């Protein structure tokens, strides 16, 4: 009997009981694959994805006033969109437009969300520098996206009967999906008190030590918070994580060096990184840990030139645009979340055919130094080649129009001699990034800049006068 | 023979002595599907394990609390509390694995939950403005920040809300705080009393202003907090037995709630147990 108990509930809900994936096809790699779809030939999954995208577009036009108005305004009818190339004519959607519609109407319901009162229905929020937007999460959305997300957790090693520590508090879009995943896969859930902010690391560490989950799902800042709490208690991380087979982190980009370092420090079987957003993106690392496979059954991802809007081919960095394939909830079509990423051109060594995406940073965190346009992630990846610096907080000091050298302020955590490190970092910046470096060691980044990755020079200078 | 009254300190001691996360409360043959760390500032963390049935019956307690406030199908209920508060995780099946139907779901209501940290109060005000919930459940420590945030946002809460419910594990709403906040918001504030270790909930009735709870879900006694002598009919500390908890039974658990058991007789729930703060 699966841990989840009888299948009566699932049948009553009209959802077939499933605590293990059903390997229907050929060529599955034993136990690592969720189903055969992830190895479909590219032509097949593109056809499948296109059918689903057309269906969402049709539903959006017919049922969601926000999209009907949008498409009518540019003279686009769904039947005129006959190819994926045609689809790029659908106007890009940005958060600012959603917020403007919300303010104009005085309600969260702007006409891009399905209203489904038959069955459980929750609303959620996303916050950011532009403001708070609201999202609709009806039961259908949770099931559809949660079912797709099972694959991600399966790849990361979650299995029926495992005890899993959950990442997000109940109301978070990830928790809505994760709780469905856990139930459908038949996992037992443990939930620390509080919320996922690092200052609650104490309760997260208590739960880890008291309940010894085999699978841990966490936001990356909380994981770093846990490590800091381990240090505070004099607890070695590998003993704290003893018994944990797999860790799944989300919420911030992880460089390859940082991932390996964390895996080694925690002493776990493996550590996976997921990528996603509540607007529809679901992407997940496979066991090769080389980029995130986009879940082609749940989202359609494009990379575009942020200036011209033109699509960019694999291997080129650009702005990430996501269209959900879920027909429930807040439907986002060609949503530009203002992240910089790329789709890799090469196939993944794992053999799965779904395209791999890497999201590097927010577009707002771009800067120019030494004649090059860079992201904070590029600097982080470079610094992570120095083992002592993995995870060390730093910020880029950015000058409008660009600066002759890369200027960074790095926290001196007191564990090493800065004198010897400085030249190594300068050499790395020159070799890896092709820019000169201006490095400032600081005791600690001021509270208002904790977690801020790029600080404008004027603000920095004003604070240090 | 009556089971002995159990103090929270005994659970703490049991956990420290044995290392058992459930402090010896895990019933033989039962396995939790969901385990929550509880909101107690004790020497060691305490936990509550629940299976499907426990979750459903616990959600029923919350549903009955909600019913006293007359929510209508189609209403939105907002929650400003941590996801680990039973007011949040029992509100909707969307939030919780293995919960078939949450309290709000059963009433045809939509839920929205804001994280329970006080600096999120501006977001709570945004919920008020754009979502217009009928009832807002607030963690006790978030009440004053919420009032301030509404005022800062220029929101007249009474235009949007019918009632506010303040809630806290083992806590109580100070009368003067309630009065001041009510005056500033123009919205009545009620209290939902909880003892999470005992899976206990009781709701202040808008009509009789006593705390309602339910005899088929709980047995409630009052005792002298020091001697533990039962003082039924007189003020004392509440001792609660959950009649539905199977995985981690709560039998005669001494809570930190104080009051006097009053008789039944409110028109809103003629058979309800009532107690008076």
Image: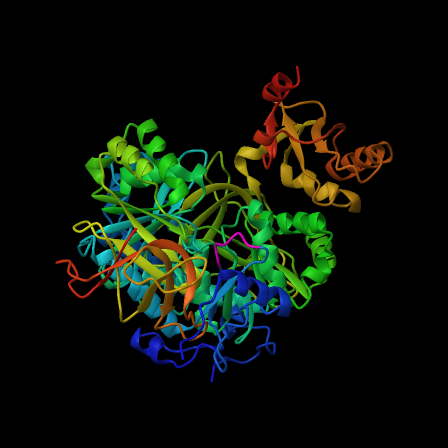
Q: Residue at x 20, y 43 (%)?
A: B162
Asked which colour scheme the image uses, the reply is rainbow
Q: Residue B142 versus residue A87: which sits nearer the camera? A: B142
Residue A438 visible, this orientation: yes
Q: Residue at x 63, y 22 (%)?
A: A460
Q: How many marks?
A: 0
Say whether residue A233 is left or right of residue A298.
right
Q: Any magenta on residue A265? A: no
Say whether residue A349 is left or right of residue A174.
right
Whole-percent x and y of residue B35? 49, 66
Q: Residue B31 versus residue A58: which sits nearer the camera? A: B31
Instruction: Looking at this view, name the residue that lies furthest to the right.
Output: A420
Whole-percent x and y of residue B235? 32, 55
Task: Report the quarter where the N terminus of chain B lies.
Answer: bottom left
Residue A94 visible, this orientation: no
Relative to A86, does residue B252 appear above or below in the rendering? below
Instruction: Looking at this view, name the residue that lies furthest to the left.
Output: B267
Instruction: Looking at this view, name the residue that lies furthest to the top.
Output: A465
Which residues make up the magenta segment?
Answer: B38-42
Say whether residue A27 is left or right of residue A371.
left
Say whether residue A60 is left or right of residue A237.
left
Relative to A197, does residue B201 appear above or below in the rendering? below
Image quarter of residue B176: top left
Q: Residue at x 73, y 41 (%)?
A: A382
Instruction: Looking at this view, name the residue that lies furthest to the bottom.
Output: A1
Whole-percent x and y of residue B143? 36, 39
Q: Residue A136 versus residue A281: which sits nearer the camera? A: A136
Q: Any magenta on residue B39? A: yes
Whole-percent x and y of residue A68? 24, 46
């Amino acid at each position: 009997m699966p841990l989840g108990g009888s299948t009566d509930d699932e049948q009553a809900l009209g959802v077939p009981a499933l605590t293990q994936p059903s390997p229907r096809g050929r060529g599955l790699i034993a136990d690592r694959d969720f189903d055969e779809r992830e190895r479909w030939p590219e032509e097949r999954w593109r056809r499948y994805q296109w059918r689903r995208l057309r269906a969402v577009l049709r539903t959006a036009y017919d049922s969601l006033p926000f999209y009907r108005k949008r498409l009518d305004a540019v003279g686009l009818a769904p039947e005129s969109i006959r190819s994926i190339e045609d689809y790029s004519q659908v106007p890009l959607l940005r958060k600012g437009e959603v917020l403007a519609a919300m303010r104009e109407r005085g309600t969260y319901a702007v006409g891009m969300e399905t209203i489904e009162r038959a069955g459980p229905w929750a609303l959620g929020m996303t916050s950011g520098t532009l403001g708070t937007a609201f999202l609709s999460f009806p039961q259908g959305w949770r099931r559809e996206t949660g079912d797709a997300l099972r694959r991600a957790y399966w790849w990361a090693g979650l299995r029926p009967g495992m005890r899993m520590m959950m990442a997000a508090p109940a109301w978070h879009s990830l928790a809505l999906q994760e709780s469905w995943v856990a139930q459908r896969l038949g996992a037992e859930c443990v939930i620390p008190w509080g919320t996922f902010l690092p200052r609650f690391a104490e309760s997260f560490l208590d739960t880890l030590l008291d309940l010894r989950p085999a699978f841990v799902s966490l936001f990356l800042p909380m994981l770093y918070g846990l490590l800091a709490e381990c240090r505070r208690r004099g607890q070695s991380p590998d003993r704290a994580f003893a018994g944990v087979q797999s860790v799944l982190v989300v919420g911030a980009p992880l460089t390859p060096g940082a991932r390996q370092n964390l895996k080694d420090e925690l002493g776990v079987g493996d550590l996976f990184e997921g990528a996603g957003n509540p607007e529809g993106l679901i992407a997940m690392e496979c066991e090769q840990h080389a980029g995130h496979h986009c879940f082609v059954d749940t989202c359609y991802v494009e990379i575009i030139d942020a200036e011209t809007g033109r699509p960019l081919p694999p291997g080129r960095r650009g702005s990430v645009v996501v269209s959900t394939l879920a027909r429930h909830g807040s439907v986002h079509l060609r949503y530009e979340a203002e992240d910089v990423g790329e789709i890799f051109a090469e196939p993944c060594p794992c053999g799965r055919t779904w395209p791999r995406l890497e999201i590097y940073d927010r577009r707002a965190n771009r800067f120019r130094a030494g004649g090059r346009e860079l992201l904070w992630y590029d600097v982080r990846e470079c610094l992570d080649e120095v083992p002592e610096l993995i995870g060390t907080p730093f910020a880029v000091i950015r000058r409008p129009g660009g600066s002759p050298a890369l200027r960074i302020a790095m926290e001196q955590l007191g564990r090493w001699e800065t004198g010897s490190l400085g030249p190594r970092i300068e050499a790395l910046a020159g070799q890896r990034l092709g820019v000169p470096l201006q490095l400032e060691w600081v005791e600690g980044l001021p509270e208002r800049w904790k977690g801020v990755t790029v600080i404008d020079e004027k603000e920095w200078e004003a604070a240090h006068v | 023979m009556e089971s002995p009254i159990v103090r929270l300190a005994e659970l703490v001691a049991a956990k420290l002595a044995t290392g058992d996360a459930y402090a010896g409360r895990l019933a033989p043959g039962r396995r939790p599907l969901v385990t929550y760390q509880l909101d107690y500032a004790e020497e060691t963390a305490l936990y509550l394990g629940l299976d499907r049935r426990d979750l459903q019956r616990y959600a029923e307690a919350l549903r009955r609390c909600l019913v006293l406030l007359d929510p209508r199908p189609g209403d939105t209920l907002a929650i400003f509390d941590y996801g680990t508060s039973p007011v949040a995780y029992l509100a909707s099946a969307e939030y919780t694995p293995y919960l078939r139907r949450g309290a709000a779901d059963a009433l045809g209501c939509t839920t929205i939950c804001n994280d329970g940290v006080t600096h999120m109060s501006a977001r709570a005000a945004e919920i008020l403005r754009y979502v217009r919930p009928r009832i807002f459940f607030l963690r006790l420590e978030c009440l004053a920040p919420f009032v301030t945030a509404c005022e800062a946002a220029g929101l007249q809460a009474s235009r949007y809300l019918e009632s506010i419910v303040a809630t806290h594990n083992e806590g109580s709403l100070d009368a003067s705080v309630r009065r001041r906040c009510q005056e500033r918001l123009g919205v009545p504030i009620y209290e939902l009393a909880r003892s999470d270790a005992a899976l206990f909930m009781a709701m202040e009735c808008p009509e009789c202003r006593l705390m309602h709870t339910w005899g088929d879900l709980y047995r409630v006694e009052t005792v002298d907090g020091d001697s533990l002598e039962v003082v039924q009919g007189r003020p004392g500390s509440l001792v609660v037995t959950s009649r539905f908890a199977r995985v981690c039974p709560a039998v005669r658990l001494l809570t930190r709630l104080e009051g006097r058991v009053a008789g039944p007789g409110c028109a809103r729930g003629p058979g309800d147990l009532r107690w008076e703060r």
